[in-house]
Image (tube, coloured by chain):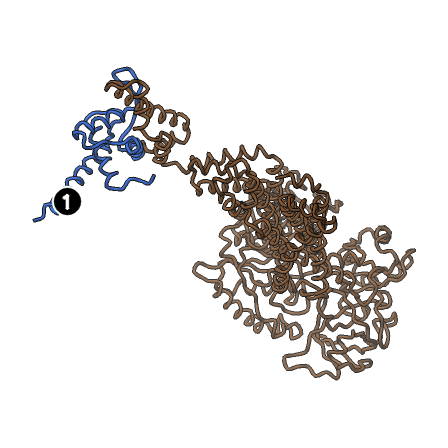
Amino acid sequence: MRSADILRLRLRSLFQRSRVEAELAAELRFHLDQQIEENIASGMSPDEARQAALRAFGGVAQIQERCREMRGNRWIEQLLQDLGYAVRTFRRSPTFTLVAVLSLALGIGANTAIFSLIHAFLLRELPVHDPGRLVAVGDPTRVGSLSTGNVRSDQMSYPMYEAIRDQNQVFSGIFASGRAHRLMVGLGSPADEGESARGRLVSGNYFSVLGARARLGRTFTAEDDRVGEAPVVVISHDYWKRRFGQEPGIIGRTITISRNPFTVIGVMPGGFFGDIVGTATDVWVPLSMQPQVIPGRNYLERWDVSWLLLMGRLKPGVSIEQARAEINVLFPRIVKAETGSGITEAILPGPDRMQVEVTPGGTGFSYLRRELSQPLFILMAMVALVLAVACANVANLLLERSMTRQKEIAVRLALGAGRERLIRQLLTESLLLSVLGGLLGLLVAFWAGRALLRLFGGTSAVAAIDLWPDLAILAFTASVAVLTGILFGVAPALRATRVELAPTLKENARSVVGAGSGGRWSLGKLLVVAQFTLSLLLVMGAGLFVRTLRNLERLDLGYPRESLLLMNVDPVAAGYEGERLESFPRNLTEHLRTVPGVEAVTFSDNGIFSGTESGTSVRIEGFQSPPEGDPSVNYDVVGAGYFATVGISILRGRDIGVHDGPGAPGVAVVNESMVAQYFAGGNPIGKRLVTIGPPDVEYEIVGVARNARDHDLRGPIPPRFYVSFLQSRDLGTDFNVEIRTAQPAAMVETIRTVMKAYDPRLSVRELDPLTTLIDETIVNERIIARLAVVFGLLALLLAAIGLYGVISYTIARRTNEIGIRMALGARRPAVLWMVLRETLLLALAGIALGVPAVLGSTHAVSSRLFGLSAKDPATLALAIGILILVALCAGLIPGSRATRVDPVQALRYE
Amino acid sequence: MGKPNDLVQGTLDLLILKTISLEPTHGWAIAKRIQQVSEDVLRVQQGSLYPALHRLEQQGWIKAHWGETETGRAAKVYSLTRAGRSQLEKELANWDRLSQAINLIARMA
């Protein structure tokens, strides 16, 4: 059959090329021989016959080439030929190959690493069934938060979830998922307090809405989520491996969580991590079991405890816009229906809090996603710039190499190779380099990606996010590799093949090299200018980020940050209640005061940089509430002497005192922002402040405190007021202890031991110096600053190498001229200056192009800066100065080499 | 060395296919046969013959095997494939139509 024949021929010419070539040669030779015989037969002598035959035959090589062209696989043959040739040439210059491949590997690998993080956090969908039909209801970044006091629309309470679940028409199923944080999981015996594990409380339809199946056992059904049923859990594959050693009898095994027995009914497959991106989950617990696993608190019955994120699967044919519309009609309707019964007036959401965010849920919920998206994009831009600079260097290397190969290229052109064919071959060499660099880069990317993930998200993120290259990442790496190969290969290839044949083939090839490099502004020089432009961007960026970090680190918080140690304890979980619970804070602080090294102790509900805050609606004497309703103001509930302990100055009036106890009149201290906003800067002392309940509680303002930063380093300090812990009705939550001490870090272990001795059942949840907590809030800035410096230095180094190469080359060509100058009386410094002037010219050209680029790209980074504008002239001047310095250093070596030229030798050197 | 123009290439293909259809043979003999039968009018150059043979082979109209001549020398012998036979019929029909048309124009009164 025809197509079979054709295929066979193609395969044969591909895999048995030498055989096929030999046959062709034999066939033509046969023809020649026949012609010679014929000539001899017609009377010529053998020699004449041969010559006549050859003449008649024409060029054998040409005929062979045309026959070869007729074979369909020419391009594959040529590609294989080119590859083989490229490999041979690279083997002959191993250092060049190594340097080029390594720089490409670093550049491509860094780009891939950042991209894989972007992919994992921002782009990748959950590994569940049809994630495109999933919809998130609520703010998908509020993964681990819980607020009390009002009905909210960014997170839902359990009763609100039930109402939405039962009344909506757009979802075939909607689940709720809420934080359980660290649960104490024991392996069976009641005495075993257990290890902490990461838990998540989910509704019974969680797994079925997601469409995920268990690997062993089964997942939850709606029945499992009913109160009173036998409590069950599902665990993750990683937890099964880690804690249970992958024991086969895991299904049906009993474990204890917070001392309650649970049965393990399922193990999820290895790739499943739940609905949250960036934090791993070990155990999924039914929502109805919340009061058992978080003892002392019931979140299920109150409309004002907002802690759940909802995700629904759209019914077939329903669009997300329809779902959004319906939910935003349903939510206010539910609120209205429940007002008066489950929802009291006090906890009504403000009018600006009635909008429910409904977004595509296929990428899951993620706290880190919002944190990281801008830093990651900034890093992506930086790393792309570094790759460009590296490419320019490789291009320059290739240019230099092609200069030395000019003779070879000229010969090949003279033999009849088409220019296009040669360019194709040179491009194949470049692509081979970049593909090798890309392959190595995948390895670099894997390691770098994990390191970055650990920097940004901690070990929990590393466990949760799988950075193994999947199709998207491989495709990215491949396209970057191919693009860079073409980018740095095209120009040198074009330049290299533009050779004058006759002059090059002559003996004296050296003088031609000068003519071939294009005069004053050769390609090599242009590349170096580009490198300096890009480096200016990176160095400027590094400068801005480093200064931002320093500004943040030195920010005045309103109190001394170095002498505070913060601790978080949960007495309710340890079984305290009633009278013991009420007196617990005072007893603990009195006990801690006796510890040597402790200067003062106080406590508060919300701590400092501890991640929680309270807010409530207030009515203020002398302030007219706006028509929308009473304003909501942040507040904290603090112990006696709070301001003195923390170090916040009292500007007017007094601190909260010991005598502000349960029987005494209610007192409050306000901060400066509150005075400015609600008292028009006047004197608030003596005025009344009422928190709206029920019940409404009245406080008299007795003091004004200096504004203090207790949550955020950025942004204005909002109004805040402080009331006495002993007068607040909101006891029974975990609270924070602030300890003033000269050496907070050194005291950590001491305090831990003291707490163990005081009551071993008390779990100390957090114990850190304040500086550590603050550092955690600026972790991203620190990472960006560090990486920006690394990238900036890397780019500078590459640019310096490029500049050094180009200048050395230029000087080497002008040895003759230098010799003449020196012979005519030029002194050393003048020669040095000549070289440095060339160097500076290139650097300044790059800087000149870079300055408008810097000024034009400010909007991209300005939101991340602090305390300085993106056009900051001091930083720009510093960056320019650094670049000039580097350029001078790069030019110094060739420059000093030029001054040591012996004029006599130079003149003889043709 | 551009490609031969279409008319010439098409005609050469026809001549080669026809020659081979009568008797499978090698390139030298094909050229000789064409020369003889056309009474020396058509002389095929090696530069066009062998590329044409290889092209026809790539297209699957002819196939080759290595055989022996009467004198015992090894030679690459081409023969027509079945697809080639129908291609030959098509080319002949085309040629008839074409030459008739040209004739009509050339002999216009």
Relative placement, left or right, of A613 versus A135 is right
Q: Is residue A716 left or right of residue B9?
A: right
Of residues A862 and A705, the one nearer the viewer is: A862
- Outermost residue on the front side: it is A824
Chain coloured brown: A
Where residue A503 sits: x, y (%)? 50, 40
The spot of residue A375 in percent (x, y) is 64, 57
User: From the viewer's perspective, is residue A386 above or below residue A632?
Assistant: above
Q: Indicate the colour of chain B.
A: blue
Q: How many marks?
A: 1
Quadrant location of the N terminus of chain A in the rendered image: top left
Q: Nearer the viewer, residue A231 or B33?
A: B33
Residue A261 seen in this snapshot: no
Q: Which three-letter amino acid code belongs to the residue tagged 1?
A: Ile
Question: Residue B7, can we see it?
Answer: yes
Q: Identify whether A402 is placed above or below A167.
A: above
Identify residue for label 1: B102
Is A520 left or right of A656, judged from the image as shown?
left
Q: Secondary structure at mark 1?
A: helix
